Amino acid sequence: MAKNVGILAMEIYFPPTCVQQEALEAHDGVSKGKYTIGLGQDCLAFCTEVEDVISMSLTVVTSLLEKYGIDPKQIGRMEVGSETVIDKSKSIKTFLMQIFEKYGNTDIEGVDSTNACYGGTAALFNCVNWVESSSWDGRYGLVVCTDSAVYAEGPARPTGGAAAIALLIGPDAPIAFESKVRGSHMAHAYDFYKPNLASEYPVVDGKLSQTCYLMALDSCYRQLCKKYEKMEGKQFSLSDAEYFVFHSPYNKLVQKSFARLVFNDALRNASSIDEAAKEKLAAFSSLSSDESYSNRDLEKVSQQVAKPLYDAKVQPTTLLPKQVGNMYTASLYAAFASLIHNKHSTLGGKRVVLFSYGSGLTSTMFSLHLRDGTHPFSLANIATVMDVGRKLKSRHEFTPEKFVETMKLMEHRYGANDFVTSKDISLLSLGTYYLTEVDTMYRRSYGKKDGQNGSKCENGVVANGH
Ligand SMILES: CC(C)(COP(=O)(O)OP(=O)(O)OC[C@H]1O[C@@H](n2cnc3c(N)ncnc32)[C@H](O)[C@@H]1OP(=O)(O)O)[C@@H](O)C(=O)NCCC(=O)NCCS
């Protein structure tokens, strides 16, 4: 069996168009601080009419292959995670095949996985399992998480965002799976779902989704601890991982989640929590678990107690989710990308625990073991390729009015046919794919912004598949 299977390389793409949360607060007439402090968000990225989940994934996959020098013939499996439905039958993966067909590689297994924000994790597990299995043919796996998170006007709208992430999977990875240190919790809930197929917007019970998330977190943590303890013969606690990375619909939920893990460790009398903190949390030990999810005092005290540990173990993972917003399937991996961006030089030898949550609901907590790696598959090179700082700095801020106008146009275009886009790609950087047209038969065409002649339209055989 292949050893140290995991993530060899990563690339991230998010739209260059964004709106500041502070400006949105003023525009929406809510109290100052509601989105920035209350939700913990700084900025929100969104697709304009020339971008969508397919163009973003074409961009991110092409960029990953180019920047790490990967021969497209060396990809043997490709799995996409997404909850942004553009077609109820044709997978996003098949659009991405255009990149590989050009090189004569059509021998690539895998399709799309969907369950809210968990699809990317399902795709990742599929690829890792493939490399570890007897069906593996020695080539790389490729995972793509791509989503545009948009909400109807109202309290959930500021928790939108958009991005695509590509992860190259193989053996001897600098980011290796500790496949046995893992706990899942899957159940039926109506916390966030998309039953209206004519609309891109979800139906969301925000408060319920928060409780479901925290219940799933507790359950996954319990499972992971149980499995670790059985395997290692000792208790697992927050001290056993250097960093904790959370799926991040909005940062406040991440703060509450980590505080919840601290509360769990206090109840388990784990060594990660000092005596003074245990004493403060002991007052809540008699609450039933149901009561504990709605107890405001517990929320406040546990967040206070958790603050120093949060700053050390979670804060370095929060940059992109705060700056880009919820990226659904890409959100957890964008948080992980933030950690690599901030800490790549000190991550070698460290364990990082990730929590993936998809409403409906599906969730897994799993563990990664990091090593420095060797070029091009090194943590340092992954940070260089992702170039997160430059990508954030070169964005274009829209006014809230322009953002709302864009949302209206996108609403109108969702599920529509027989239109051409403005093809205004002035804000996109070189190498970015963009939507040019959806014809009468709903076939989508894409172009690529090209260095030499401004833009290159890949209509015809290559880009629309017919
Ligand atoms: C999260 C959500 C429910 C919040 O909407 P809301 O009900 O209007 O917001 P609230 O009134 O609860 O305010 C949010 C927070 O901001 C705080 N707040 C409000 N105004 C504030 C201000 N001026 N300054 C600082 N904080 C403020 C509130 O106290 C609350 O904090 P708390 O969560 O610690 O209680 C909504 O944005 C939503 O539904 N988002 C989508 C949910 C989602 O992504 N679900 C999927 C999960 S995987």
Image (cartoon, grey):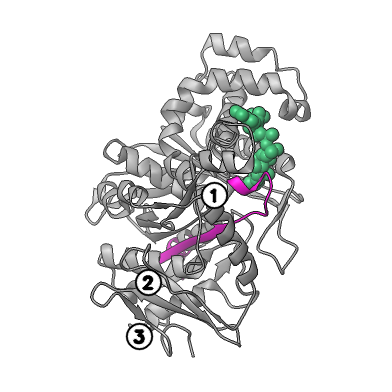
372 relative to 191 in the view: left or right? left
Residue at image position (73%, 26%) is 292
Instruction: Identify which residue, 270 or 56, lies in the foreground.
Output: 56
Foreground label between 2 and 1: 1
State the residue position of label 3.
104
Q: Amino acid at mark 1?
A: Pro
Q: Amino acid at mark 2?
A: Ile
State the residue position of label 1.
400
Instruction: Identify which residue, 426 or 219, lies in the foreground.
Output: 426
Q: Secondary structure at mark 3?
A: loop
Label located before the other in sequence (3 or 2): 2
Q: Quadrant of residue 230?
A: top right
| Percent position of residue 406, x then y | 55, 61
Instruction: Identify which residue, 22 or 309, lies in the foreground.
Output: 22
Q: Secondary structure at mark 1?
A: helix
Question: Residue 418, relative to residue 22: is it above or below?
Answer: below
Instruction: Identify which residue, 301 or 242, lies in the foreground.
Output: 301
Distance CA(mark 3)–CA(mark 1): 45 Å
Residue at image position (52%, 27%) is 237
Q: Point out the quarter of the image occupied by ligand 1.
A: top right
Does 136 appear in magenta?
Answer: yes
Q: Amino acid at mark 3?
A: Gly
Stretch in magenta? 129-158
Q: Secondary structure at mark 2?
A: strand
Count every numbered label the image shows and give the total: 3
| Percent position of residue 256, x then y | 60, 30
Q: Which mark is residue 75?
A: 2
